[in-house]
Image: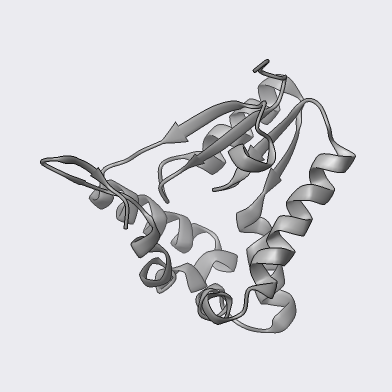
Amino acid sequence: MRVSNNISITGFPGAGKSTITKLLVEKTGYDYFTVGSIARGIAESMGITLSELGILSKSDTSYDKLYDQKQCEFLAENPNNFIFDSRLGFFFAPNSFKIYLTIDPLISAERTLIAIQNDPSRASEKEAGQNVSPHYPTISPRGIVLN
């Protein structure tokens, strides 16, 4: 499979996905897409918190379909030279250069708290971790365990 000029970035919260995306955008001039911004925008337009949107998303698949639709629209408009900050970006952009970032959970929590304190639009993420964390793999003595 040929790797394109596209980059998909995924990983744990607080691992630096947004920071690396911003740096790569500056260096490459590529367009970028971030599902986090889409989710925050949807929550804001509905007048609910990101955490509340996460709870709604658990019982209503239309939100997942909306995220997928937004990603497909972005890819249709930007077939080349883009950076995709999305947990499933690698799936939507299979020929992209893939980056997966990991981080110690305590550092992740610290970085996420700092981001929330510095960006009021992310304030609802304080409780969002409860909705997201079961989806992340954990490391055990036997290897990586998918939850």
Question: Up-down: is 38 above or below 8?
Answer: below
* Rendered residue at 39%/59% (across/down): 135
Furthest residue in direction right, as rendered: 77
Q: How many callouts does the rendering have?
A: 0
* Residue 65: % across, % down: 70, 65
* Residue 16: % across, % down: 46, 40
Image position of 120 (left or right of 100)? right
Viewer-nearest residue: 142 or 74: 142
Viewer-nearest residue: 31 or 88: 88
Viewer-nearest residue: 59 or 29: 59
Furthest residue in direction front, as rendered: 1
Asked if residue 85 can be seen in this view, the reply is no
Image position of 86 (left or right of 129)? right
* Rendered residue at 66%/18% (across/down): 3
Q: Quadrant of the N terminus?
A: top right
Viewer-nearest residue: 116 or 97: 97
* Rendered residue at 57%/75% (across/down): 57
Image position of 66 (left or right of 114)? right
Question: Up-down: is 31 above or below 41?
Answer: above
Question: Up-down: is 79 above or below 18?
Answer: above
Asked if residue 63 can be seen in this view, the reply is yes
* Residue 9: % across, % down: 55, 36
Find residue 32 and report its image quarter: top right
Furthest residue in direction bottom, as rendered: 47
